[in-house]
Amino acid sequence: MARQIFINLAVKDLQKSMELYTALGFTNNPQFSDNNGKCMVWSDDIYVMLLTHEKFAGFATKPIADTKTSLAGLFSLSVTNIDEVNAIIEGGLQAGGVEVNEMRDYGFMQQRTIEDFDGHTWEVFCMDMSKFPGA
């Protein structure tokens, strides 16, 4: 089996969250989805499991963090260009996501950040390594 990453997120409203992640460019894999969890696919190797709090708690060994008030992690998605960054973030905003700061331009990298309904934070960025300092 190929190396893959599955990010598991506790969400309060599963359907609303699935719609937001669809607007961000993820697709749903119904084979691994049910009424308590939705498997959202970014690529052949990257998956986000949106899980109800009840289902998530069944896997957890600690209380579920309140990600609306505390940062539990930053999840970053790389894309090929700034137009793709903008299209993804704009789709997420139209679906109800919140952009938490202005676009950041580091010269070699541009990044925009969006939060979902539960406060999970996603950074979408593109890089041009030929512009990396010292390249």
Image (cartoon, grey):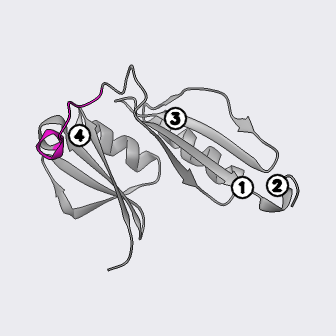
**Residue at 38% over, 67% down:** 4
The residue pinned by badge 1 equals: 127
Instruction: Measure the C-alpha gap from mark 4 to mark 1.
Output: 32 Å
Q: Nearer the viewer, residue 91 or 68?
A: 68
Establish if 132 lies above or below 71.
below
Residue 91 picture location, percent across and down: 51, 42
Instruction: Measure the C-alpha gap from mark 2 to mark 4.
Output: 40 Å
3 or 2: tag closer to the N-terminus: 3
- Decide whether residue 110 is among the magenta residues: no
Name the amino acid type tagged 4. Leu
**Residue at 26% over, 38% down:** 10
The residue pinned by badge 2 equals: 132
Residue 103 picture location, percent across and down: 69, 34
Establish if 20 lies above or below 68.
below
Residue 64 picture location, percent across and down: 23, 31
1 or 3: tag closer to the N-terminus: 3
Name the amino acid type tagged 2. Phe
| Residue found at the very far front of the displayed protein | 61
The residue pinned by badge 3 equals: 114
Q: Which residues are magenta?
A: 56-65
Name the amino acid type tagged 3. Ile
Q: How many marks?
A: 4
